[in-house]
Image: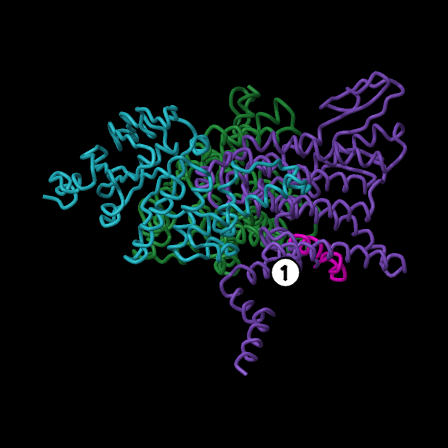
Amino acid sequence: MKKLKLNKDYLITYGMVIGFYILMSILKGTGNLSSLFSGLLVPICVYTILAVSLNLTVGILGELSLGHAGFMCVGAFSSAFFSMCMKDIITNSFVRFFIALIISALVAALFGIIIGIPVLRLRGDYLAIVTLAFGEIIKNIVNILYVGKDSDGLHISIKDSISLGLKEDGKVIINGAQGITGTPHDSNFTVGIVLLLITLFVVLNFMNSRSGRAVMAIRDNRIAAESIGINISKYKLMAFSISAALAGVAGALYAHNLSTLNALPKNFGYNMSIMILVYVVLGGIGNIRGSILAAAILTVLPELLRGFADYRMLIYSVVLIALMLFNASPKGMEIKEKISPSRLLAAKKQTKEVQ
Amino acid sequence: MAMLDVTNLGISFGGLRAVDAFEVHIEKGELYGLIGPNGAGKTTVFNMLTGVYKPTDGVIKLDDKNITGMKTTQINQAGIARTFQNIRLFSQLTVLDNVKAGLHNGYEYSTVAGIFRLPSYRKMEKAMDEKALELLEVFDLDKEASLLAGNLPYGKQRKLEIARALATNPKLLLLDEPAAGMNPNETKELMDTIQLIREKFDMTILLIEHDMKLVSGICERLTVLNFGQVLAQGKTSDVLNDPEVIKAYLGE
Amino acid sequence: MSFLNYLINGVSLGSVYAIIALGYTMVYGIAKMLNFAHGDVIMVGGFVVFTLSTRMGVSPVVAVLISIVVCTCLGMTIERIAYKPLRSATSLAVLITAIGVSYFLQNLALILFGSDIKLFTSVVKVKPLVIADGQITITGETIVTIIACMIIMIVLTTFIKKTKAGQAMLAVSEDKGAAELMGVNVNATISLTFAIGSGLAAIAGVLLCSAYPSLNPYTGSMPGIKAFVAAVFGGIGSIPGALIGGILLGVIESLSKSYISSQMADAIVFSVLIIVLLVKPTGLLGKKISEKV
């Protein structure tokens, strides 16, 4: 009975994503989608994947992470680097991008483990600030990293591109703050939706497995989880690194949608981490479908507000504050209770029963 | 040889000697009580037995295996499960999932199998569901299986905690004030349940309790702690009639 | 000798961090919230002085005083509108609201002043101090910053120790419920804390802009985060911790900029924070918390 309801709930989530894909494809095919909006389709996939994956850390594991963009950054750069190296060797873009995706997931997961081992010992706000610090460090290091390739192989420097000492035939792949230029445009909306579906599949199935149960048990009561023999560090690290790996995948999707990739505060800094957290909180902590909706709506919202020109981000911030006050304050919840459709429905049902 | 052998157990917090020279020997299948006034160090003993605190000195042996200083997780795997004085359930998980979390080490399959729903996932989850429901039935909780644990009434939360502890398939069960906050009827019912699990699962039980009716009703032997030291030890009726014990409880 | 120069610069920058960190730490101690908008109050303070002093020619002292008043009122208004309704909500909800407030302030400034960098005229008129035959120069800004930080620390510590309102702050940070039962006006105390924190942010803003004379709507953001790091570094909730954390952070930043790499300075600052927290999980002067079983 309960299982059935659960599965139905998940089917709605998958259905929603597929429905969105079909709708957008039809609109695009019939020429009814503005170029502005069609340019948002891949970013929507990127941000929904990020939101769902962060929800695994914040909602399922119950730890506040402010460094999610760092994992996205790692995934973006590792995959773009791979694609740049293999541009002329693997010409089939599908195969190349597939391998790039796997690399992005693995490298981000590795960073998740390296960072998770020390960080997950901390609690609450301390954990939040340290993840923020790690995210900033990653961004900072990427900005001073120079990697070039010539017939001798790879050259790495943290000074400048000249000190790479490349031969005549060599070329700079990662050029410090200028990042990577000329990444093959391997991602598109379809790939994005498939990756989103895979992310959903991984997160939802993980939640409903033995390991996911262990993770949620730790979230609800660490001491009790220990007392029934659950290995706390192992499962915390597992959830954290899966979350990181998925963020890495989002990074690969992001990188292969742009011709120039560089690590700026606005795409890989703490501001982005916070933005993703906003999606998760507004969508409901632990609510996967909510994360998708919030991320998609909030990605589109600033564009919809474009008519307001300079005022759009101001309106955006006011909407954000108002939404939080409405969703989380006792007064807001009271109003919400009054106007919620399920309550109205229940009231109707009650009057019917009385009749 | 006793199942649980504790010799000369002691712990200090800073300069404070919370428990000193604690000894207890519990035989297999026994129902043993640990009593004493508030602050005597009873829960501290439990915390040492389950690895929450590391004892400063002394030896704890379970079935002749030295488990002193092991981690909580390892001690549970070695065969000790417990409940808590202030209930600690996984309140956002369902009643069923609380027990299934307790089955965590008994029914293993890999994370990959879980994500990709491989046959081992289906087989094990089915077995876990059956086992968990069987346990819930013992505690008359099977009808609430799909409720969130946090929404259960108080008395049922206490029972669920015991069910979850039993799910780890322990040799020894530690109950920390199982009757706290219960009315006389609920306490009576709890006494029956404790007797039942002891017989049904052939369980050895050590419990902390303040309710003397419960203690004298079901415990065969008792240890009385006072100011961190053993005041008396022996058959329940003897201990409860010991003038020293009466003095500790009622004052001069 | 250049080492001494770098060190003095570091102490000066650290003093600014310390003043900002004080605001963070006090608000955290009392409201248990990470006030992400705190850094943007610094920016507001800077813009008020910029408008009054650089543009309208008001005397710097008056401009600074007005800026303090504006920021104090701003802090109290933010608390009243955005945070107070969420007092019983989860800390995460408050955090997101604070982020919303931060966006709001940044974008308001963007509309009012534009995104271009403004040249800020220093309000400090103290002459630089030249010692050791001109090998060491201490700028007027540095002298004023360090003195201001010391005065603020002393005044604040005395205020908390000696006054009723200060004691009320301690009580509320220890246990809000118990404080209320003892007759402490919790709402007023929280409001006062925001007022003090924001007033300090205004001072920090002016000092920061005087030493690094560029101002735009995002000026407060990074110093805000760094001051937050400083507060955590010293042990969040602890006032001496904020001072030590702030100054250490400033010195580390200044020295790594000079000796290692200016691009790596931020990464080094954050790495030191991580190392400190791994060794002492609640910061240098933070209280140890343990859960009772």
- Closer to the camera in the image, A45 or B26: B26
Left or right, residue A299 beside residue B4: right
The N terminus of chain C, quarter of image? top right
Q: Residue at x 34, y 32 (%)?
A: B48
Q: What residue is pinned by disc 1?
A: A319
**As displayed, is residue A236 above or below residue A327?**
above
Left or right, residue B81 beside residue C222: left
Residue A99, x across and y down, in percent: 79, 33
Left or right, residue C158 beside residue C38: left
**As displayed, is residue B51 above or below residue C33?**
above
**As displayed, is residue C202 above or below residue C232?**
below
Report if residue C145 is visible in the image. Answer: no
Q: Amino acid at mark 1?
A: Val
Chain shown green: that is C
- Closer to the camera in the image, B150 or A143: B150
Colouring mode (rainbow / by chain / secondary structure / one colour): by chain
Magenta stretch bounds: A291-311
Chain shown purple: that is A
Residue A300 highlighted magenta (yes or no): yes
Left or right, residue A191 beside residue C205: right
Q: Dot 1 lies on which element?
A: helix
Q: Quadrant of residue A300?
A: bottom right
Q: Residue at x 27, y 57 (%)?
A: B184
Q: Residue at x 74, y 36 (%)?
A: A76
Report if residue C80 is visible in the image. Answer: yes
Q: Quadrant of residue A148?
A: top right
